[in-house]
Amino acid sequence: MKIVILAGGKGTRLWPLSRNSFPKQFLHFGDKRSLLQKTILRFSECYPKEDILILTNQQYFHLVKSQCIELEPDFEYKILLEPESKNTAPAIALAAKYLQEHCGVSDEEVFIVSSSDHLINPEKNFLSLLPLAEKSAHEGNIVTFGVHPNIPETGYGYIKVASVGDGSICDVEKFVEKPSLDIAKQYLLSGQYLWNSGIFVFKMGVFWSELESQAPDVFLHFQGTFQEAVSSFHNCNDISIDYAVLEAAAAIKVIPMNLSWSDVGSWDSVYDSLEKDDNSNVKVGNVVDIDTKNCLILGGKRLISTLGLEDIIIIETDDALLVSKKGESQKVKSLVEKLMSKNIKESSEHSTSHRPWGSYTVLDEGNRYKIKKITVQPNQRLSLQLHYHRSEHWVVVKGTAKVTIGTEEILLHENESVFVPKSQQHRLENPGKVPLEIIEVQVGEYVGEDDIMRVQDDYARV
């Protein structure tokens, strides 16, 4: 069975940690692995790494690649780029076409589609159900996974079934969109509804047949070669796989799962998913609390101290702070929309920006100056470039830097520095085996990120 992992989402519901420049699939919550990495490792338990295909877009390609390298430095995962965002139906069709043309997958073979931002516990319970799903898909069914609801959640879609049994496979009566709170309570009491996990299993031939029958306007873009599909992708309708195929499919089944599952779609769901202390608090970072109960507190660099709080969410980053009552976190998306309408940069950009070669963090900035911490990964280098309006001072904090200034190349070690004059071609490179860290001080009449002229670049950005 082939594995397709969708990793192109631009989630805003976990702001200020998740932003357009670094969405939630790349985040980790209190441990070392991101949600994407957890998803890759989950399927690697049962299937060869060669059978995993990660679907993302150009904006996140290097984030996906760097997180894959963290997992397996000596293995190159298959990463497929969407030409543009067109929702899940065209995306899955593009992945299916790629599997057929580049991986030799036949119409009789089965593939599973999963988002990259799920928390599942215990994972072995989910993995134990995959053979049943694969068998049913081989029989011609489309198979999805449903989760027994334990609260009247309004942030998930639901699946209605005639009868529910763990470890069995059930007929789907209908799919239901995200309900109001009163209706969600009715669903919970009825025992006939499951949360829609958004994990699907298809036989390749069945997928194309159902797509042709239910969404011919999408299907027609995938009749030629893979490259032709890429070329016409921008003409595809923006439609989810649920609307395009699942809700009207001829043969669709659901496997109920009695486990802890979350698509981490709100801070309330993050709270529900993480381990709590004796006062039912989730605390990550430098947190000191007194008389605080039922709170989610995620800190960054600063000390967070609380007194007498209950049912509160506090999320702190370098440049933003969110404070919310629990139960209100579904409104974060509306908050981000309001911030965007006011052109507030923190709505979409972090103080740390990720690049193909590593990352940089803005430590301070003001009129005519900016101070950054720059991290360059081993064997990576920035573009050969110049700036018209600023000069730069580089101080090596960790590792070894290979610096090109004009025609001169020098090696800098820890606590050594160099000056880069305005309008001079220069390049920073890490020739070593550990990450290179430098402090950069920019000085000039303009220190915006767009004052850059790239002459050569390893990442095709010239």
Image: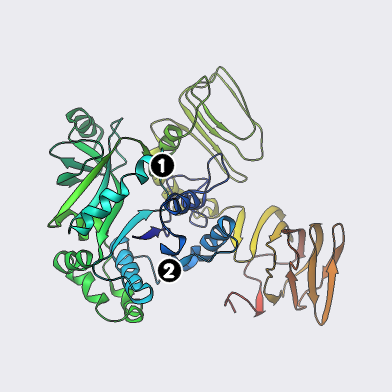
Front of the two marks 1 and 2: 1
Provide the secondary structure element on which disc 1 rests.
helix
For the N terminus, the image quarter is: bottom left
How much space separates mark 1 and mark 2, taking CA atoms? 26 Å
User: Residue 341, position in %: x, y?
Assistant: 44, 53
Q: Which residue is mark 2?
A: 80
Camera-side residue of 445 and 273? 273
Camera-side residue of 436 and 86? 436
Provide the secondary structure element on which disc 2 rests.
strand
- Asked whether the viewer can see residue 100, the reply is yes
Camera-side residue of 320 and 73? 73
Q: Which residue is mark 1?
A: 123
Work out whether 314 lies above or below 280.
Answer: below
| Residue 134 numbered tag | none
In the rendered structure, the answer to whether residue 241 lies left or right of residue 432 reads: left
Where on the picture, by quarter, is residue 56? bottom left
User: Residue 435, position in %: x, y?
Assistant: 71, 58
User: Residue 64, position in %: x, y?
Assistant: 51, 60
**Count of all numbered marks drawn on residues in the image:** 2
Residue visible at 57% across and 53% down in the picture:
350
Residue visible at 34% across and 44% down in the picture:
128
In the rendered structure, the answer to whether residue 210 lies left or right of residue 413 reads: left
Work out whether 41 lies above or below 432.
Answer: above
> Disc 2 marks which amino acid?
Leu
